[in-house]
Amino acid sequence: MNLAIVGIGLIGGSVAIRLKEKGNFSKIIGVDKSESNQKKALQLHLVDEIASLEEAVKSCKVIILAAPVNAILQLAPTILDLVTDQVVIDMGSTKENILKLIENHPKRGRYVAAHPMAGTEYSGPEAAIPNLFKDKMMVYVEAFRSDEDAFELADSITEQLEMKTSYMNANEHDVHTAYVSHISHLTSFALALTVLGKEKSQGRIFELAGSGFESTVRLAKSSPDMWTPIFKQNRANVLEVLDEHIKQLQLLHQAIEEEDYDELYKLIKKSNKIKRIIK
């Protein structure tokens, strides 16, 4: 049984590494519009060969979509037009727009919407690492819309990646990811822009950067090719969480501006409750 990976970057490449280790697929075929990514994926032995999208769909039982979400939005209907009994696994970071687009497609049952909640700030084939997914969460979205055999095959891959599982509808997924993933990146981008602006006038500022700064701003190294489409596809939810985030920043700003350190203490103390969720 052959498997195709469309988009051979951090996610697609890390899937390939793990599935190659398991050895349950005869051949792993890469599909990527970037010639540079194609060459790197072959050099790093992430895939066995490169093929066109149509060739890959015809020759593979499983097609994993690990491209940016704007590309998945364009590719999903085209791929479903080509499949017979193949299984298409969408690993994109947003779901609602994509699933609305294909909801009435006659091959909708062959499509499994899944989001691995894993990643790093790096991108491209060289960013792929073993065990990226180990003990992380795979979110299945509208799993009831997938054919039983298609879902079982997708879930067997999740097991090989050693992931936990969760189930959501499309709106629930996109709202939750806006709060736990997308806002983290936006905050990091904003902090990086703030500090880079200051660095122009005070160039030695990074000499003071410690582990706290590094851990907070590291996501700002993430690819704009990946994250701009995510913010576009999840615009309404991202704006909602940004509004709430700005509100909280304004409360902190107000407390400091008014020298109300009792209120500042209360806000920080309230934020400490996050320990109930994150150990």
Image (spheres, rainbow, N blue to C red):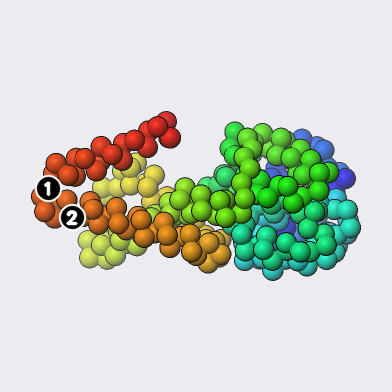
Q: Which residue is mark 1?
A: 260
**Which residue is at 12% across, 47% downward?**
260
Estimate the x, y position of residue 29 in percent, counting from the top left: 80, 53
Q: What amino acid type should be assigned to the residue bearing mark 1?
A: Asp
Question: Above or below — where is 250 with respect to 114?
Answer: below
Q: Is residue 78 visible?
A: yes
Question: Mark 2 packing: few (<14 Cα in 10 Å), some, or many (20+)?
Answer: some
- Res. 86 mark: none
Quarter where residue 6 is shown = bottom right
Per the model, the C-alpha gap separating discs 2 and 1 is: 8 Å
**How many residues crowd around disc 1 within 10 Å: few (fewer than 14), some, or many (20 or more)?**
few
Q: Residue furthest left?
A: 259
- 42 to 138, vertically: above or below: below
Query: Left of 99 or right of it: where is 78?
Result: right
Q: Residue at x 25, y 57 (%)?
A: 250
Residue 14 horizontal/vertical position (percent): 65, 45
Image spot of residue 231 (x, y percent): 50, 63
Identify the residue position indicated by label 2 in the image.
254
Question: Is residue 69 or residue 113 the one in the foreground?
Answer: 113
Residue 41 can be seen in this image: no
Q: With 54 as the anchor, is 142 left or right in this view?
A: left
Of labels 2 and 1, earlier in sequence is: 2
**Cβ atoms under marks 2 and 1 closer than 8 Å:** yes
Q: Residue type at mark 2?
A: Gln
263 sits left or right of 133 in the view: left
Q: Quadrant of the N terminus?
A: top right
Q: Residue at x 15, y 51 (%)?
A: 256
